[in-house]
Image: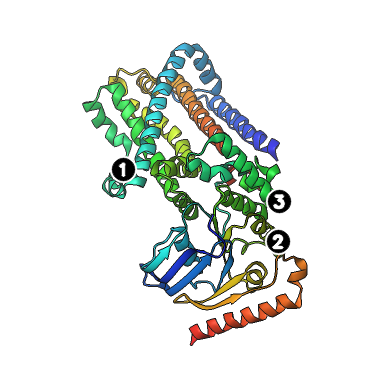
Amino acid sequence: MNALRIALPILVLVLVVLAWDLVVRLFGIPPFVLPGPGLVLATLIADGSLLWQSLLTTLAITFEGFALAAFGGIVFAIAFNHWRLVEYSLYPYAVILQVTPVIAVAPLLLIYLPQPLAVLACAWIVAFFPVLANTTLGLNSVDHNLIALFDLYKASRWQVLWNLKLPAALPQMLAGLRIAGGLSLIGAVVAEIAAGSAGAGSGLAYRIAESHYRLNIPRMFAALLLLALAGVAIYLVLSAISYLALRRWHESAFRRER
Amino acid sequence: MSEPGTPIVSLRDVGKTFESGIVALDDFSLDVNAGEFVSLLGPSGCGKSTALRMVAGLSTASIGTVELPEGNIGFVFQDPTLMPWADVAANARLPLKLSGADAAQSNEAVARALARVGLADFAKAYPRELSGGMKMRASIARALVTEPALLLMDEPFAALDEITRFKLNNDLLKLWQELRRTVVFVTHSVFESVYLSQRIVVMTSRPGRVFADIPIDAPYPRDERFRTSAEFAGHCRVVSEALGQAMTEQAA
């Protein structure tokens, strides 16, 4: 069963790449329309150092946006949990921030902020909400009897937060962070794309926009491939952290035995 | 610790009305003496848990006076109510940790409490790795770790199978005889209350009132022989009849 879970997706990948290659060759599609997988790989190697630098730039912004979103989301969730009035006052705006498409906000941010900051802001905006929403849910779903127990032993608010609420909210918090990781990458890419060729950026999304104008389609594909791999890597790292933190106690980390 | 025979808990004409308008307790009075094992027996919803929470200071009376014991109280909930992210030792240590107790003394107290409930070998186990009975033992260890003068138990064994429940009943009685703490035990099982208690307070429901206060004078130690004796059956009959009357009175 485990072997199949690894072997099957790889088989699908091989089949898709083969079909892609076959289509490009059979119909003689020119590289500026659709480059074959071989050419994409060759471009990836040839433009390696350029793309690698861009990847690092994008990852750095993604990471900064993610870290700020994680910090902000958790701090606001704690504040919401402690002071209902703060929650009532601010939660609607957090929702509005979330439901307004970031692609529509990005051009505005680019007017008011220097580009690196605007990109960072976009990464933050999209990643912030899932952390906030999930952590809030986690903090609000603490076992009432455990709260009563802490009351019985006259625990301070700080002790309740640190010893009870935060550990109890950890599974939901980690789920929020897992979503936020991927989203902060999307936010960074969206902002760079919005900045477009006018931007002074050097991230992967900027490379994609630039290659698009130059009709360097193979490089677009190569950059896209790197972005996808970066997204997968972020997800895997966050999943691994989540697993390590929960493996001893949370149901989600256990396989059900039959 | 207080002298045996002096009341350490005293509820006088206590009433409790919830925001929803439900009257959980009305004109409820209860004295518990030091060293006593008292059970509150009644149908579900009769306010016995509310009374127990009041004694713990977790709920406040709408009217009436409540005199609480000084010092530590141990509370065992119907669910084990363990922190799933912490191992058994850390769960048992919680009350000491919250009061900022000395680490070395805490270690000793935790080891002693776990040994008392037979979990010495499971200090490093996580709650989800334990059976229902063992989780309840861990919960009792946590309640005992501060050496409380008063132990409050809210239907602690209701969710367990009969074999486990009997075993835990026996172990609880043994602990009570060794430690001589005061125990207030809430249950809806006639048999469990007769087996364990020196005194059974039968309650009516909606509103919760004391219907009868029945002494069970069978000597301790009580064991499986007592559980199958004619004496036990006789007490059970008396208590069952009282409970039946309490329930018809409330239906009428």
Q: Which residue sits at x=43%, y=44%?
A: A160
Tags 2 and 1 on a common chain: no
* Frontmost residue, B54 versus A224: B54
* Frontmost residue, B172 versus B246: B172
How far separated are the C-alphas under marks 3 and 1?
A: 43 Å
- Give the SS element for disc 2: helix
**Image height check: is B26 above or below B91?**
below
State which quadrant residue B120 falls in: top right
Chain letter for the residue marked with disc 2 in the picture: B
**Dot 1 amino acid type:** Ala
State which quadrant residue A59 falls in: top left
Give the number of the mark in front: 2 or 3. Answer: 2
* Frontmost residue, A88 versus A156: A156
Disc 3 crowd, CA 10 A, few/some/many (<14, 14-19, 20+): few
- The residue beneath circle 3 is A258
**Dot 2 amino acid type:** Asn
- Give the SS element for disc 3: loop
* Frontmost residue, B216 versus A144: B216
- The residue beneath circle 2 is B170
**Image height check: is A159 above or below B186?**
above
Q: Residue A78: x, y in percent?
A: 37, 42
Chain letter for the residue marked with disc 1 in the picture: A
Kindly identify which numbered label has been placed on residue A94.
1
Q: Residue B165: x, y in percent?
A: 68, 62
Chain letter for the residue marked with disc 3 in the picture: A
**Dot 3 amino acid type:** Arg
Q: Which residue sits at x=71%, y=75%?
A: B232
- Give the SS element for disc 1: helix
Is residue B104 shown to the viewer in this render?
yes
**Image height check: is B241 above or below A137?**
below
